[in-house]
Amino acid sequence: MSQHIYINGEYFSKDDAKISVYDHGLLYGDGVFEGMRAYGGKVFRLEQHLIRLWESALSIGLKIPTTIEALTADINECVEKNSLDEGYIRLIVTRGAGALGLDPYKCDNPQVICIADKITLYPDELYQNGLELITAATIRNHPAALSPRVKSLNYLNNIMAKMEGLKAGCVEALMLNHKGEVAECTGDNIFIVKNDLLMTPPVEAGILEGITRNAVLELADEMGIESIEAALTRHDIYTADECFLTGSAAEVIAAVKLDDRQIGEGKPGPITKQLNEAFRILVRQ
Ligand code: PXG
């Protein structure tokens, strides 16, 4: 498939899609992004992703040189141009090229990039049987340093945590916050079920407020599954009946072990399965 990569309203082939080495997105991780899914050629909850992108940008003082309406049309066009029925859409806004110093005010040309491509999913076996997690030593950013709600181009904590997970044979790793509470995984939010109550850490625990997380909370509500947002510790996960992760890439996937402790029955539980099915129906509506 020859690809059409969008940069500031123009399309380039994969080989010609280039960004300056002076771009502060590269030099300092100065920029924001979104990872989205297309189902049946339609981007799932595009508006929510764009609102989150605009809020991330606002938070770092980056003015996105377009509007939500115009970018919505551009993304839909990009998905169509790439004949992407099922796939992944990576949207990136960098601070743009400037001088080698930190000064972001020297960057006067933010780059808006949209890549629509195939998606690599976790192996099917993990959806059938659930995945294993370890707790990473690398914690989420302290909210007083940089809000973990900003989906910035600086994902180093999460990459360090992902390395820890992969070294231990786990495709995901649990990240705690600066208080030692459960926050989320490197690219997924986390839920547990205990005595039929669904629980997930609140935004104040230093998480990224996932679009999939919010969709699952809405589905639970519709299905009569009681849910709360509550501070959780690793003990709560070790002793939970069920545990699952949510994310645009992962959708809903069971976690059956944390730090070598079996969670519940050690297989995807009934509420996890129900929510997974409901989510799959929702994205195809
Ligand atoms: N927490 C973090 C830190 C994330 O990066 C999520 C939670 C889940 O949020 P959404 O809105 O997707 O439900 C994310 C999102 C990838 C990839 O390529 C990662 C994400 C999304 C899409 C693709 O690993 N992370």
Image (spheres, grey):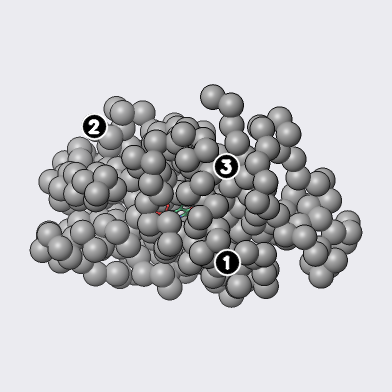
Residue at figure coordinates x 52%, y 38% from the top left = 81
Q: Position of residue 61 (x, y in %)?
A: 67, 72
Outermost residue to the top: 1
* Above or below for 136 versus 63: above
Residue at figure coordinates x 29%, y 27% from the top left = 125
Q: Position of residue 71 (x, y in %)?
A: 55, 58
Cα distance, mark 1 to mark 3?
18 Å
Q: Amino acid at mark 2?
A: Gln
Relative placement, left or right, of 234 versus 94 is left
Q: Disc 1 vs disc 3: which is toward the camera?
A: 1
* Secondary-structure class at tag 2: helix
Mark positioned earlier in the residue sequence (1 or 3) = 1
Q: Position of residue 180 (x, y in %)?
A: 45, 64
Cα distance, mark 2 to mark 3?
30 Å
The reply to whether callout 2 and callout 1 are in contact (CB within 8 Å) is no
Q: Disc 2 vs disc 1: which is toward the camera?
A: 1
Mark positioned earlier in the residue sequence (2 or 3) = 3
Q: Quadrant of the N terminus?
A: top right
Q: Disc 2 vs disc 3: which is toward the camera?
A: 3
**Residue at numbered disc 1:** 67
Closer-to-camera residue (24/244): 24
* Above or below for 21 versus 33: above
Instruction: Name the disc covering residue 126, or none.
Output: none
**Residue at numbered disc 3:** 115
